[in-house]
Image (cartoon, rainbow, N blue to C red):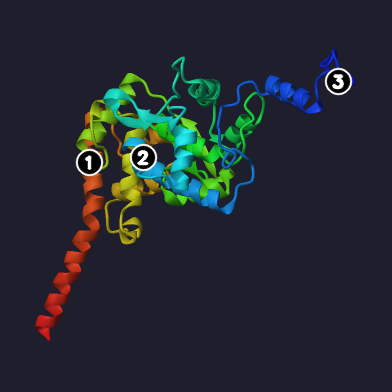
Amino acid sequence: MSVMRRGQKLNDQHNLTISAIASSVAEDIFHSTPLINSELINRDDLSTNIVKARRALMYRMLKEGSTSKLGYDGYPADAGLYYTVLHTPGLHMNRGRLGWGFGKPRDKDDNLVGQSFQALWSETEEVFKNATDRLGLDEIYALWRSAPYGLKKGVMPILALAFFLANKAHIALYFDGVFTPNINEVLIDELLNDPKLIQFKYVSAGENKSSLAKAIAEKVLPGQLLEGDTSKISPLDTARGLVSIVVGLPNWTKRTSSVSDSAQEVRSMLLKASDPNKVLFADLPTILASNSEEDLVHKLKTVIEELLAAYPRKIDEIKLLMKKFFVLR
């Protein structure tokens, strides 16, 4: 039997089975498929137990990213997925002075698994950098499913989260069209349920922008929001910190009109933030009527302090009124 592909015979000697021919054609088409040696996760339809293990692994990726081997002790199902999908190719490993973290796959000659991820990782980076608008997670999945990669649905959420965590200093996250400062377990669930709701945008910054981002980080943001070396703070890091403050305010503070007009405008803008660069370099200077970096940082610091103090101050006022009421009675 002769089998033709692109005008050429694939079985001139008539000594190959259909299965062998199909395998040869598949290897030719999907020549850059990452090596993922697990039939449990490397498939489109997962068992209930593997769905649970995948979710557990992704939760742990958020919480234990800086811990050796994500802190796994023993070999539960999610640990097996970790070693196969993340650790063996080097997507999560000890990165020397930076410690354990997510990043590019291993490129050493003796690590064929890591090498097999190189093309996928590099093209995904280029797609982000060259995109003129936000990229939907479903668009990334479509790229990964197509030739020459051919990834399966089951493994893609893990790789998507690893890619984001490795590049979070440069990639802004959006949920249902709204800039979201941090990914959490709720967003993990949404990512797993409906990737169309998740979007990303590559954020770059010039030296002048980095200067403003660093100044705001050092003088405005509480230390617990931005830990470590602030000299490497990016505009995206700073925007995330500002949005996190406002999102974390008590509900009363998010709605009250008892704060200044500037505080109300900054609060509203950050709650609806759609672009981290626009937040820092367009919206804040406009709202605060600032013409210099120093003036902007000073006014923003005043506004953030006002918002943080508003609820405790209101509670103190209520306590004082209650004391007066009971004294009068």
Residue 287 appears in the rendering: no
Residue occupying image coordinates x 32% and y 61% = 252
Residue 258 point in image, percent of width and height: 28, 59
Residue occupying image coordinates x 24% and y 52% = 308
- On the image, numbered disc 2 is attached to which residue? 70
Observer-side mark, 2 or 3, equals 3
Residue 37 appears in the rendering: yes
Residue 276 point in image, percent of width and height: 40, 35
Task: Please state which amino acid type lies under the numbered disc 1.
Answer: Lys
Label 2 or label 3, whichever comes before in sequence order: 3
Task: Please state which amino acid type lies under the numbered disc 3.
Answer: Val
Q: Could you say which is closer to the camera, residue 170 or residue 67?
A: 67
Observer-side mark, 2 or 1, equals 2
- On the image, numbered disc 1 is attached to which residue? 301
Dividing the picture into quadrants, the one containing residue 150 is: top right
Dividing the picture into quadrants, the one containing residue 291 is: top left
- Label 3 crowding class (10 Å Cα cut-off): few <14, some 14-19, many 20+? some
| Left or right placement of residue 287 versus residue 21 in this view | left
Residue 39 point in image, percent of width and height: 60, 39
- Res 250 label: none
Q: How far apart are marks 2 and 1 (CA)?
A: 36 Å
Q: In which quarter of the image is the C terminus?
A: bottom left
Which residue in the rendered view is the most extreme toward the bottom? 329
Label 1 or label 3, whichever comes before in sequence order: 3
Observer-side mark, 1 or 3, equals 3
- On the image, numbered disc 3 is attached to which residue? 3
Q: How far apart are marks 2 and 3 (CA)?
A: 49 Å
Q: What element carries label 1?
A: helix
Whether pointer 2 and pointer 3 mark residues with C-beta atoms closer than 8 Å, the reply is no
Q: Could you say which is closer to the camera, residue 251 or residue 193?
A: 193
